[in-house]
Image: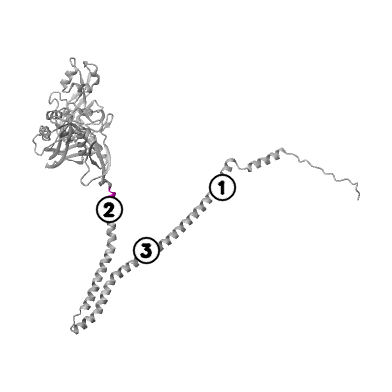
Amino acid sequence: MDTNKPEPKIIHRKRRFSPKSDTGARIRQMDQRPGLTKFTLDIIYKNLYILGIVLLRRKNKMMRGILKFFNRFRGSSYALLEKLTAGVVNFWHQLIKNIKAPFIRLGNIRRQMRPVVEKSKRDGKSPLWAYGQVGYTLFRLLFTIFRTLFNYAVPVAAAIVLVIVVRDRLDVEHSVGLAVTYNDQHIGLIQHETVFEEATRIIKGRFISEEDIPIVLTPQFALRELEDYESFMEPRDLANMIVAASGGEIDDGFGLYVDNIFLGAYGEIEPIIDELNYILDSYRTGIEGEQVAFVRSIRVDDGVFPTSSMRSIEQIRDQLNMDDPYAPLTSYIAREDDTIATVANRLGISYDRLVEINPVLEYRDVTPGQILNVPISQPFMPVMNIRTIVFPEEFPFDVYEIETIQYVRGFRSIATAGQPGVREVTASVSEVNGVEINREILSTRILSAPVTQRVIVGTNHPSNIVSFGSVSSQGFLWPTRGGRITVGLHGYPGHTGVDIPRPAGYPIFAAASGTVVRVVHSGVGYGRHVIIDHHNGYTTLYAHASAIHVTVGQRVNQGDVIASIGRTGNATGNHLHFEVRRHGRIMNPAHYISP
């Protein structure tokens, strides 16, 4: 081997760099990477999936535990129920056995003693010993029955007694209360503090002025048991005792309250009632069945009142007959010579009341033209009169329309006049100070029935009505259906046509062909009327119509219905006023038309 042989030379080839291909690979790698949003959602999804699997497994495990517990509980419940049932059945059987045992023993003794008794009777001996055995057994039977009943009854009776005792002892409201001490005086015993609060309200209602109410109305309470001879105090009795213990001057009396407003107290109740009845009597009208009552609520309470709240009967009378201080206000415009005193005297209110309503008067007197607020005079004690009245009353009749094609639309004629009915009404009327405030109908009774009004109503279209009548030698058609001329030309001063009376709604025909040049809806003169120009120097006028069926500019043929008979304008009855003019000159229509 040639050791001097040269070693092979390793040639390292350099990889050519291609910017284009390398950039594409990087882009492909970047495209394969998930975005941040997708990556986050994938992580959240995977974790929620795992969490859901864990929760589902735990839920299934918990449900298996619950089912296992209820299965065990159900089994133990069934077992316990079986034991209880067996115990009840055994107890019942034993009870029946114990009840039957004495009777069975009595029957056995009786059967055993029967041969002995029969043998003793045959031998002529008295069977006392056998009877003694039967009697002894019967005695033991009765003793056993009573003992059994006693053993069952005593526990039940003891339980009932225990419940009654516990209930009575626990019912604290009927045995324990609050002892009230006021101004170092023992007042009495109340059930709870609300009784004192109600008594305080009653006390405050016995003072006319708030300044006279005792500043301190704070008693002392002590919890103690109710004695056998004691009873709980009512709020009114407690109020009397507190007022008596307040240390002020007091009197027994009867307090008058109007809408819970204290007016004062008087020593006797009869004069107060007499004053109230006197006011009511002044409003009585003497109508039978009339009821009179005050609108305000009135209350008279007896009790102990401070001397400052006592009033004379004259003072109470003045208060009951005074005007309402809270009446609504109205305006008064001061005159030239008005002062506060003259205005108060003129309006019948006190000086102080006028200044109270108008505080600006405290600083200056009344000036001419000044607007003052003054109360509307209303009595302090308004009275309501309730009485029953009976009066006749008309009520409307019905209208029955008879439609017919014999008449044109707009035709309306009363065939039978209607008459209203009359009924007797019984009503309860309520008045306050002579002003009616309510009326309630109690009953009604028909005195005379109404008469239905029948009205003929035309339904035919004007174009469907065919005119009939003769055409005069002048070529004019009689302008309505039937009839005759009753008032001719100049039949009275200013009459420029002829009158043809016809029932209301009858059709009015065009006397000749032409064009409608005037349509007037008026309530005076001609009333509703139509003028037609016949294009030959002639014009015709049709007046006092109840309805018009054409319009200005409309072309009409001879015999077309243009209106309906009526009495609009200066007309005393239903008729057609017909005029003919030639070149504006009034002509005699009788020379142009004939019926």
Q: Examine the rendered structure and indicate whether residue 307 appears above or below residue 445.
A: above
Q: Nearer the viewer, mark 3 or mark 2?
A: 2
Q: Residue at x 27, y 53 (%)?
A: 165
Give the image quarter of residue 301. top left
State the residue in front, 582 or 270: 270
Above or below, 325 relative to 452: above
Q: Which of marks 1 and 2 is nearer the N terminus?
A: 1
- Indicate which disc, 3 or 2, sits on the residue closer to the N terminus: 3
Q: Quadrant of residue 460?
A: top left
Q: Position of residue 45 (x, y in %)?
A: 55, 46
Q: CA gap, disc 1 to disc 2?
A: 71 Å
Q: Write the start and end of the magenta stretch as one range.
A: 164-171
Q: Name the residue under label 2.
A: 165
Residue occupying the far bottom of the picture:
123
Q: Which disc, if any, is residue 570?
A: none
State the SS at label 1. helix
Cα separation, mark 3 vs mark 1, equals: 56 Å
Residue 137: x %, y % from top left: 25, 73
CA gap, disc 3 and disc 2: 32 Å
Comparing 250 with 99, the one in front is 250
Residue 393 located within the stretch drawn in magenta = no
Q: How crowded is mark 3: few (under 14 residues within 10 Å), some or many (20 or more)?
A: few
Give the x, y percent position of residue 364. 23, 16
Helix, strand or loop at label 3? It is helix
Which one is in front in this view, the residue at disc 1 or the one at disc 2? 2
